[in-house]
Amino acid sequence: MREYDILRGPVVTEKTTLQKEMNNQVTIKVDKRANRVEIKDAVERTFNTKVKQVRTVQVKGKVKTRGRIIGRRNDWKKAIITLMPGQRIDFFEGV
């Protein structure tokens, strides 16, 4: 897989913003089939940074109702990436 097949997009929430500021961690939505080594290589090549640690979480899709119709969101995988000291990734800085 290529870098752009593995990395799907950032996860921007209040918790991930705090992690970014306090612990130098970035949370990214990734392909379900990617492993930690592939994710680390893709982040380092795409953003020109050094990665210290990668943790992954399988997120289950929620059941949602809209009127009488019951649906389910897709399952997805997220990676919590700890960067080396002095390294940073800016997704929305200056927008």
Image: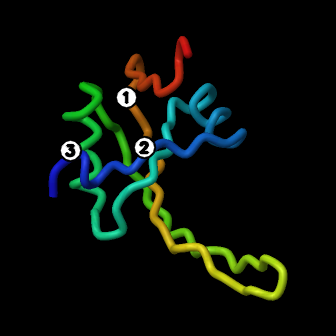
Q: Which labelled disc corresponds to residue 2? A: none
- At label 2, counting other C-alpha atoms closer than 10 Å, the crowd grade (few under 14, some 14-19, many 20 or more) is many
Label 2 sits on a secondary structure element that is strand
Query: Closer to the camera, 66 or 82?
Result: 66
- Residue 64: where, in percent of width, then height? 73, 76
- Residue 46: where, in percent of width, then height? 24, 33
Q: In this view, does 73 lie above or below 17?
A: below
Q: Report which residue position mark 2 lands on.
A: 81
Label 3 sits on a secondary structure element that is helix
Q: How far apart are marks 3 and 1 (CA)?
A: 14 Å
User: Counting residues from the N terminus, which is met first, the one under dot 2 or under dot 3?
Assistant: 3
- Residue 4: where, in percent of width, then height? 25, 46
Q: Report which residue position mark 1 lands on.
A: 84
Q: Distance between the residues labelled 2 and 1?
A: 10 Å
**Residue at the right extreme?**
67
Q: Report which residue position mark 3 lands on.
A: 41
